[in-house]
Image (cartoon, coloured by chain):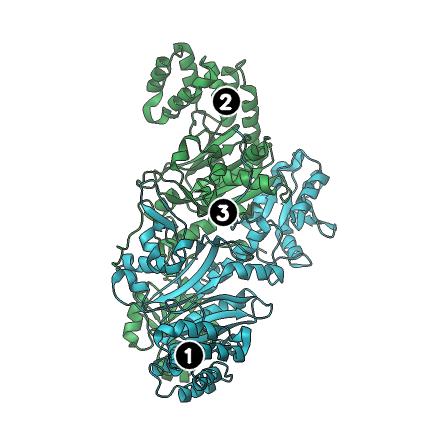
Chain colours: A green, B cyan
Amino acid sequence: MSKPKPQILKGFRDFLPRQMLLRQRVLGIIRDVFEKHGFEPIETPTIEYLEILTGKAGENEKLMYQFEDQGERAVGLRYDLTVPLARFVAMHQNDLVMPFKRYHIAPVWRADKPQRGRFREFWQCDADIVGSASMLADAEAIAVMAEALAAIGLVNAEILINHRALLQSLGHLAGMRDEQAGTLFRSIDKLDKIGPGAVTRELIETGVSEDAASRVLELISASGSADELLDQAGRDLAGVTGAEKPLRDLRELMDYLVDLGVPENAYRLDFSLARGLDYYTGPVFEAVVKEPKIGSVGGAGRYDGLVGTFLGRDIPATGMSLGIERILEVIQQFDLLESPPSVAQAFMVSLPKTLADAGHLARELREQGLRVDLSVLSNRSLGEQLKYADRRGIPLAIIPGEDEIARGKVSIKDLKTGEQVECDLTVLAEELRRLLNGPVETTPVAGDSMGQAG
Amino acid sequence: MSKPKPQILKGFRDFLPRQMLLRQRVLGIIRDVFEKHGFEPIETPTIEYLEILTGKAGENEKLMYQFEDQGERAVGLRYDLTVPLARFVAMHQNDLVMPFKRYHIAPVWRADKPQRGRFREFWQCDADIVGSASMLADAEAIAVMAEALAAIGLVNAEILINHRALLQSLGHLAGMRDEQAGTLFRSIDKLDKIGPGAVTRELIETGVSEDAASRVLELISASGSADELLDQAGRDLAGVTGAEKPLRDLRELMDYLVDLGVPENAYRLDFSLARGLDYYTGPVFEAVVKEPKIGSVGGAGRYDGLVGTFLGRDIPATGMSLGIERILEVIQQFDLLESPPSVAQAFMVSLPKTLADAGHLARELREQGLRVDLSVLSNRSLGEQLKYADRRGIPLAIIPGEDEIARGKVSIKDLKTGEQVECDLTVLAEELRRLLNGPVETTPVAGDSMGQAG
């Protein structure tokens, strides 16, 4: 049999240790923020009945990985984490306490055309609150999102906030029927890119009166505090069908965000936010990072119609989803989080005559919380072993020389500077920690787990 | 469109928060042990070219989830983590430092008949050392396995050790050709179940002489220290083709295990271990838990032929794999690890008049490391909110009463005992910690991450 060429499918990725350490760290930080807020973890199957998955995907159905399994069932790989949540809530409603706060960090698959930053297998980090219609739940989703973004170093992220029904009212203001809303939303969404003049022209081309178009433009390009914006919208949309509820919602939401202590610069009302509205029914939000220029790193909003799909009744729900892949690229590119090259903090050299000492010493150091790689190269020279450790990026090497061990000591070598010191065995762990906290980087490589809090 | 029935495929599972918290904790502990030993994390794609995946599976190929993707490529879901490792090493050999120590904790898929404890989607925890032929690497794999099993509470686990080539020598002792070895291994493997008499009869039925059969039986059922067993094998197999190398390997391995300080009762030489030998070439090991009666919870060994498959040359490799699903069932059944019912440690009641205080207080407590769920039920009564928190299993509730807040205080209610105390805001975090460490359980719900060690 000829050997197949070692390769992977386009749009899929291997992660080498260094990349993986950063991924684990970022996912750990996000998980920690979710758990700090009391969101509970769940997991669902990778493969589900196709009819379950296609519930909401609509035009995206062709991007779903689907096939017949060995039992000739039509199945697919999950496309997002929201449809599985709806199915989960329907199946386990008797075991869940409502409002149900859950988070789900897991890969999803889309047979999309691969391109820079877009993959066929990628992870999503979702946190949702199911069973609450309160704007306090939306505020909590935004609070969690802001906190997660800040925790992973994206301190300039800004969460833009709008309301699905307010956009629809804008359509009414422009004299459009609800069915034409899509056109309006697409034009509005381009405001940042093409400017107010071009958007106005687009609107007029689709039949909006000049006067109405300019009133829409005035509102979506207005700037000011949330209060000022909501006052202006109140005036502009006075008497327009369906405008009262979204304005009331947004006022409440803005008040709650202040109550929750979300930093003022972390969010902003933006009536021109009109993207990805598919199934949203209330407030919508999108996290944008302008510096460094990344664009959208996640979004979400309220979707009161979806979770109840399988139950045949509406269940209010709101939440947020972070697109971790784009975030990770930026963190790597701009070095926003330190990432050690190796998981090990110290390399224990294996010398034939002191191997038992080395083995027991490594064990004791691990029991004291240090990550110690015991060399398997006992048949190589000291120099070769040190070179190996350095190539792996391990910062410190412990050399248990025979004479030193006899005197209750070992040598510690800093593999970056080449400096070597002798250290008493009784204080070895402390000395290693001191050296790791010194010039050598000692950033945690995985996210702090919540386990430490109790 | 009619609503599809909410259901999942047989052999697949949803994990509710409480199960998920235990899974995360166990996987976190195992990950921590791997990292403490310097094994580096990697990740590989879920979906790979089918020709890559079928390299080794052999008769198991029919159990592989396979399909044609949108580009009409024959693809499959990974069946284990070892074949992807071989492909990974071949593709990234220039970026890896050999010996390469990697761990991989991830799901795999098998279209197997679902039955108790056997699933179509399940997680594996693998740690391997690629590029070292030293028995020290095998000893390290056993050390890591023993430590992981002890860390998750399976303190009675015993790792049985044998050697593939020693079993082959037993075949030679019995006068069998190498092609007949499979029959021999299957008989030997039944020793525990059917006893020495029945095994002897089976061997004789397959053409082994009575004398040879009794010599095989004597050796595989021998008990004693590693030294005694190896001495006996040395005598019994003197002059038998291929017996020298495995005996030398095992002597070395046993010495290394002592050097590494692996507890004596954590492993045992067992010449009757003859399971799942497919691609092993050296020492083989299997972790068995007798009390509680679980049977095999993982295994592995040396496989010098596999990793090099895609490179057309042998690359020595050894490692271990833990079958996490069976372990988790047992941990749950026998309550080996505490698992909190809720991720949140405290529930912050939302009262309309003190909502801003509640929000800011929750934020401060989280910054101090506590997991605080802010109630989204601000429109419900205090009693209803407390009932909700209790149903979720959150141990403590914080009640920010208007009068109390005015005096710089809040109430803390223990939702299990019903006891309520007033607490000064300046010492709230400390008081919550004290209460959590008291009668209320405060076990970490996720595994301790390595991040803490630096």
Residues at discs 1 and 3 both on one chain? no
The image quarter containing residue B306 is: bottom left
| CA–CA distance in space, label 2 to label 3 | 37 Å
Residues at discs 2 and 1 both on one chain? no
Q: Residues within 10 Å of mark 1 (few under 14, many from 20)?
A: few
- Element carrying mark 3: loop
Q: Is residue A5 above or below residue B267?
A: above
**Residue B434: percent from the left, percent from the top?**
65, 57
Residues at discs 2 and 3 both on one chain? yes
Q: Residues within 10 Å of mark 2 (few under 14, many from 20)?
A: many
The reply to whether residue A409 is in sight is: no
Q: Is residue A291 above or below residue B190?
A: above
Give residue B207's mark: 1
| Left or right position of B102 against A102 | left
Q: Can you identify the residue that label 3 sits on?
A: A45
Give the letter of the chain under mark 3.
A
**Residue B364: percent from the left, percent from the top?**
57, 46
| CA–CA distance in space, label 2 to label 1 | 86 Å
Taking depth in this image into account, of B319 and B365 the one nearest to the observer is B319
**Residue A85: percent from the left, percent from the top?**
53, 40
- The residue at 54%/27% (across/down) is A250
Give the letter of the chain under mark 1.
B
Q: Can you identify the residue that label 2 sits on?
A: A166
Q: Is residue B173 above or below residue B154?
A: below
- The residue at 46%/29% (across/down) is A278
Give the letter of the chain under mark 2.
A
N-terminal label among 2 and 3: 3
